Structures are given as structure tokens and as C-alpha cells.
Image (cartoon, rainbow, N blue to C red):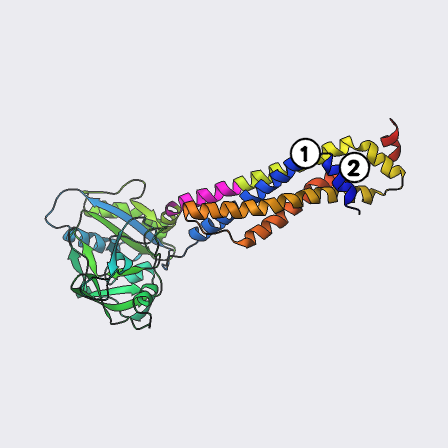
Amino acid sequence: MQIKPILSALRRHKAGTILIALQIALTLAIVCNALFIVHERVEHVSRVTGMDESNVVAIQNRYVGTPESYIPLVKTDVQALRSMPGVEDAYVTNAFPLRQGGWSTGIQLKPDGQKEGVSSALYFGDEHTLKTLGVKLIAGRNFTSNEIVSINRDDRPAPPQVIVTKILADKLFPDGDALGKTIYYSKGRPSTIIGIVAKLTVPWTDWEYPDNVTIMPLTFNSSYQIFLVRAKAGQQDAVYKSVADTLYGVNRMRVLPENFGVRTFEMVRARAYEKDRGMAILMSIVCGVLLAITAAGIVGLSSFWVGQRRKQIGVRRALGARRSDILGYFMTENFLIALAGVVVGVILAVGLSQWMFTHFEMRRLSFTYVIVGVVVLLGLGQAAVFAPALKASKVSPVEATRSV
């Protein structure tokens, strides 16, 4: 089919042609970046914690009153939780993955603490921590009961023994010989790496170093405590429903917040990534609406042009044009408009991505999304114009020329 007559016809309909091309360009630019954001959010939400998340119940507890030491209360509560029917193990901590709050500090390789250290999140625990979390110990050993000590709010956490994640160990000692090495969480106070776990993530979902975690044999002497409980297979619901009664039965002088006092880890994950899921859903809806509006615009404009050109179509049919020729004409005409739109759209998509990278520190748009967007928009344009083009191809020469 000759392109020149089609271009001539488009020049006579400049306003409509430019509007549809710009609509396609804007849709491509927004949809490419929106889908890229959706993909990033989905990847973020799907991040593994390194835990065996099934059958884990988290309890956030605050004691009421001002005892001289909270440690006896904590030990009594932990023992009560471990003795519950359906409970496999339990321990007390200051934080856990996806909690959205916790402690962090820098790690030094020298006792003077002069150089900038490697940042790490700090999880307090005991010899039951690894089993409760379901974390795999790949080197070294676990804590022993006599290594667990208490820490006050104003103390610097720097116990003699620590367990670290594999990624953190490799950052500290790139040669892979971290086990048994001495590091410093506090100036002049050495800690020895006695164990390395395969993976465990930090409490925060947006921290710069998501896999830098240290487990310390400490119990926090505070009114605020977090208990983690691992239920036996198939017993999570029963443990979740009865854990509050168990704790209140031990000591009623406590508060378990209504919304997040007792949660399954599924609830913890859902709350941690609530904003990410909302963003992904919103961006998906925006993409769907924009694509629908663009398709509707193409259908409307094509139908309008078919109505305007009935006489010309009839003349072409009378001169021997086949239905397939008329169909091909409108399909090609729309393809040229869409092609011009996606060319402009690619430039806008890349520019928008660069702007977001500069102002919001987002990753640059992968060109794969641009290519997919181009294919989708061109395909959408052809699908949208097919019905009006098919209607045009069915115009009878007699019907179209009857009023001439």
C-alpha cells in the first residue's frame, strides 16, 4: 500500500492526528515508568527475610509499673511461652525482620574506632533465637545459656560473642575468614564472631544495607519487650489466639497493644509492605485507565474519520478497491500515527525517568520496559482501530455514492 496518500490525508486532519499521537506519547511515558515502579514495589514486597516465616507469632509487650529490674519478669514470660501447648520454641528480643524499628550501629576492625565502620542492625537474643527464627547457621556455633547477659537502656551493646550474617561477614572480611575474628561495636570492647548465618534481614524495609545483621546474646532490661514464638506445624492459629491469655495469666501488669500486640508474621509482613502494595495497586490502576482512555480515543477518532469518508470509501470501492484494501488503509494510517506517538513517547519516558532519578533517587528506567511499552501501545492502537476499519471495509459502493 502506498504511504503518500495516507500522509496527505493525515495532513488534512492535523488536529486529530496530533492529539492522538500526543496521547499515545504521554501514555507510553507514564505507563513505562509506572510499570517499572510497580515491578520495583513487587520485588520489594517479595524480599525474603532469611527466616522461616511460617508458624511465627510476634508479641509486643509493655510492663506496667517500675520494678528495679525487668529481667525476672522477662524470664518468667519466656518460660511460660515455651511451655504453651503447640509451641516449639520462643525467645525475647529488641527487634526482628520487618518490624520497622530497632537498633543499629557501626562495626570497626580496630579498637580505636577512628575509621568509618560497616553499619549493622542489632538483634538481641539467646540460644533459642536461631531455632525460633528458623535461620540456618552455616559456620561456627550457637550461643550457650551462660553467655546471655542483660543490657540497660544507656549501655553500649558490645558482648564478647556475636553471630553475624554471611553478607556482613564478607563485607568485614572479604577473604571469607570472618569466623573467630575480633570486631568492635564499641571503642576498646572486642567482640568475637562465633557464628555465621546464611541470611537475615534488618527490621526496616528501606534501609541501605538490608542484610547487615548482628545477633547478640543480650536481654534488654526494659519495660518494653518483644517475644517471638514458633508454633508447631498446624498450631499457629491456636497459639496466636491463646498467647495473650497465657501472658496475662502470668502477670496482668502489662499492656499488649490492640492492633499490633499479638501478630502472626503474615500480619507483620502485610503491615510492613502496606505502602508498597498500595503504590503498586495505584500505579496499576493508572496504567489501566490510561491505556483504556487511549484505546477509546483511537476508536472514537477512527469512527469519526470513517463517518466523514464514506463517500471517498464508496468511490474507492467503485473503482475496484477490495474490502481488505480499505481495512489495510485505516490500519496503516493508525499505525503511522501510533508510530509517531511512540517515538515521542520514548523520549518522554526516558526524560521522566531521568527526572525521577535526579529528584527522588529512584533507579533509572530499564530500556526493556520502553521496548515492551512500545510494542503494547502499537498493538493496542491496531486492536482499537480494527473495529472502525472493519466497519469502513463493509461500506457498499452503492450506499456510499447514492447521495453523490
> Is there any visible trace of residue 32 in the rendered image?
no
Sequence-earlier tag: 2 or 1: 1
Which residue is identified by label 1? 16
Residue ranking furthest to the top? 403
Residue positioned 31% across, 71% down in the render:
139
Marks 2 and 1 close (CB-CB < 8 Å): no
Residue positioned 50% across, 45% down in the render:
352
Q: Position of residue 386 (x, y in %)?
A: 73, 41
Taking the image as shown, residue 9 lies to the left or right of residue 50, namely right
Query: Which span is picked out in magenta?
Result: 271-285
Circle 1 residues within 10 Å: few <14, some 14–19, many ≥20: some
Residue positioned 25% across, 48% down in the render:
246
Label 2 sits on a secondary structure element that is: helix
Report the predominant secondary structure element of the magenta stretch: helix
Please tell me whether residue 276 belongs to the stretch shown in magenta: yes
Distance from label 2 to label 1 (Cα)?
18 Å
- Observer-side mark, 2 or 1, equals 1
| Nearer the observer, 334 or 243 | 334
**Mark drawn on residue 392:** 2
Please tell me whether residue 309 belongs to the stretch shown in magenta: no
Label 1 sits on a secondary structure element that is: helix
Q: Amino acid at mark 1?
A: Gly
**Mark drawn on residue 186:** none
Q: Amino acid at mark 2?
A: Ala
